[in-house]
Image (cartoon, rainbow, N blue to C red):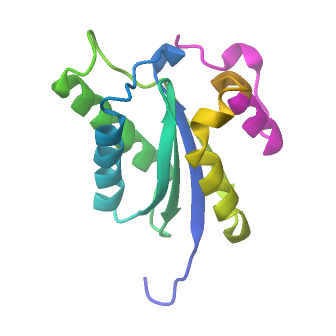
Amino acid sequence: MANTYTQLYFHIVFAVKGRRNHISKQWKDELYKYITGIILNKNQKLMIINGMPNHIHILIGTKSNCNLSDLVRDIKANSSKWINEQKFIKGKFEWQTGFGAFTVSQSGINNVIKYIKNQEEHHKKKTFKEEYIEFLNAYKIEFKNEYLFTDE
């Protein structure tokens, strides 16, 4: 679009169905590369991706024509299909329904990158559920505890 200038950053978080520890250290880098390809093929900018065996964090810069829900749907659908085709786990791999997406200001990018980079250290002190609820509270997103992670 001519004369349209945007700088939109999103910190995206989603979990393995049931928050199971299915993402193995042996193949997580391959998964991250695969997800990177999906994001780049959608003409969006990946800043960083990292996570734990039961969830991932992605920081992306988006263009004005990006539909975030469609992008996350494509990331989750294509990556779960790829994981299943690779037979990385016994049984069927699935991502949990839904996702969290939180806007990031230009001045906050470096802090979010450090946060995502240090997931292993961070989760020595906090569970994924505790982390996720902290995000929801920090961004003043109303939620009901009984509806969080209902597809376990």
- For image coordinates 50% across by 70% down, the residue present is 64
Establish if 112 lies above or below 52: below
Q: Residue furthest bottom?
A: 3
Task: Report x, y in % for residue 81.
Answer: 24, 30
Establish if 136 lies above or below 143: below
- For image coordinates 18% across by 27% down, the residue present is 86
Residues 135 and 53: in front is: 53
- The answer to whether residue 58 is seen in the rendering is yes
| 89 sits to left or right of 99 | left
Classify residue 80 by image quadrant: top left
The residues colored magenta run 131-152
- Quadrant in the picture for the N terminus: bottom left
- For image coordinates 77% across by 39% down, the residue present is 141
Task: Report x, y in % for residue 130.
Answer: 73, 25
Classify residue 65 by image quadrant: bottom left
- For image coordinates 72% across by 26% down, the residue present is 126
